[in-house]
Image: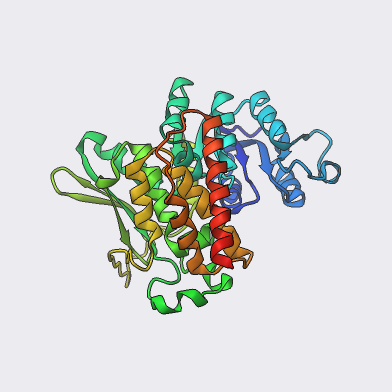
Amino acid sequence: MESFSRSVILLGCTGSIGKTALHGICRSEPGKFLVKALSAHTDFQALAKAAVDTRCGAVCLTDEHADIGSLQRLLPPHVRCYHGADGLEAMLRELDADIVLNGIAGAAGLFATLASLDSGKDVALANKESVVMAGQFLLTYAQDRGRRIIPVDSEHSALYALIGAHGRSHVEQLILTASGGPFRTLPAGSFPDITVEAAIAHPTWRMGAKISIDSATLANKGLEVIEASYLFDFSSDNIDVAIHPQSIVHSLVRLKNGAIYAQMSPSDMTLPIMEALSDGQLALRHVVAPLDFTNLSLTFEKPDEARFPLLPLAFECSRERGSYCIAFNAADEVAAHAFLNRACSFTDINRIVEQTLQHDWSESARDYRQVLIQDAKARRIAEIALNEVAT
């Protein structure tokens, strides 16, 4: 019988992170991981196929209105089905696993992160919104339960490794790289005419639609700045962003002695995902192809904050703390989805977030209930701003 070293639960298995994780588990490192359970939101067919491929014992369809009967008919009889948010919580509580990969997109991922920690499992976190929204509350929540949060974003995975290698006390500054998105060189005067199709055509990464929009506005890099500030306990004044179109250098650290160290690898999320899932417990080999330095050119430049104002806004929110980060994330979700639904223009995204942040968000959210209250408030304000800019 095949022996497995690490047992995992994959949440959001039909999204880009989940699919990459499944590919890595089944093909890059076969035999080293046992998939105990999977979740998806609505795509029951893809969930069923993944369950059969991994021979897992449980699945959860988190959409409250999902057709569970159709899912069950596609599954072997031994696979247990869970349903909705309560079902996800029950699945996490009832099944043992070494680690949970949270690949759920958006604010909905926070509930899954908290439920995973509550069930006594470490979390490989691809859902940056969990940290952006819950901040120090989330980190304390994990610490109180003796659990760890291991970052999956390529930038934060790189920082996690670099800080671990050199020691937190020796690091002066964190430098996150950004591809610059598809409009890095587009004249600002053309921004109002940007289409959804152009915005989701990322030049170096294959991602979901919403995160692709965030990359195009640099909102995603702003969220990553906030996430890095919380995860690694650095002031945003000690965090910088460099535009790096090749997406080869994923992050850098500047040590107190002035030296800079970088993590470099191909633009493939398999490596940070598998590193987080293994958490140093497994020797991973050949997860991604080694870099070919033949004719490899690496360039860096400062972000154009005038053309991409959401990035400096995110830095400001990180400095202010309170609930500003919650409001930034909520307003960006409202605006980005409105753009995807063609209810506003590309430049309206900036205006909606800016108008939302003009309100007072100085009150901190100290628990999950307060996070939800502030998030809902920000979404209401963002919807009002959307109606104003769209008319």
Q: Left or right: 30 with respect to 149?
A: right
To which quarter of the image does residue 242 belong? bottom left
**In the rendered image, is residue 5 in sight?**
no
Q: Position of residue 187 (x, y in %)?
A: 39, 78
Number of marks = 0
Q: In the picture, which quadrant includes the N terminus?
A: top right
Relative height, residue 158 to residue 185 (above, below): above
Q: Position of residue 173 (x, y in %)?
A: 24, 46
Q: How far across and how far down the image is residue 181, in percent?
A: 43, 66
- Relative to the observer, which residue lies in front, 70 or 278? 70
Q: Hey, which residue is sitting farthest left in the picture?
A: 257
| Residue 248 in sight here | yes
Q: How is the image coloured?
A: rainbow
Which residue corresponds to the image point at 46% horizontal and 49% vertical from the top-left?
328
Q: Nearer the viewer, residue 51 or 312?
A: 312
Give how far across and how far down residue 215 sits, in percent. 46, 61
**Image quarter (top left, top right, bottom left or bottom right) of the C terminus:** bottom right
Image vertical order of residue 136 relative to residue 317, above or below: above
Residue lying at 45% horizontally and 62% vertically, measured from the top left: 350
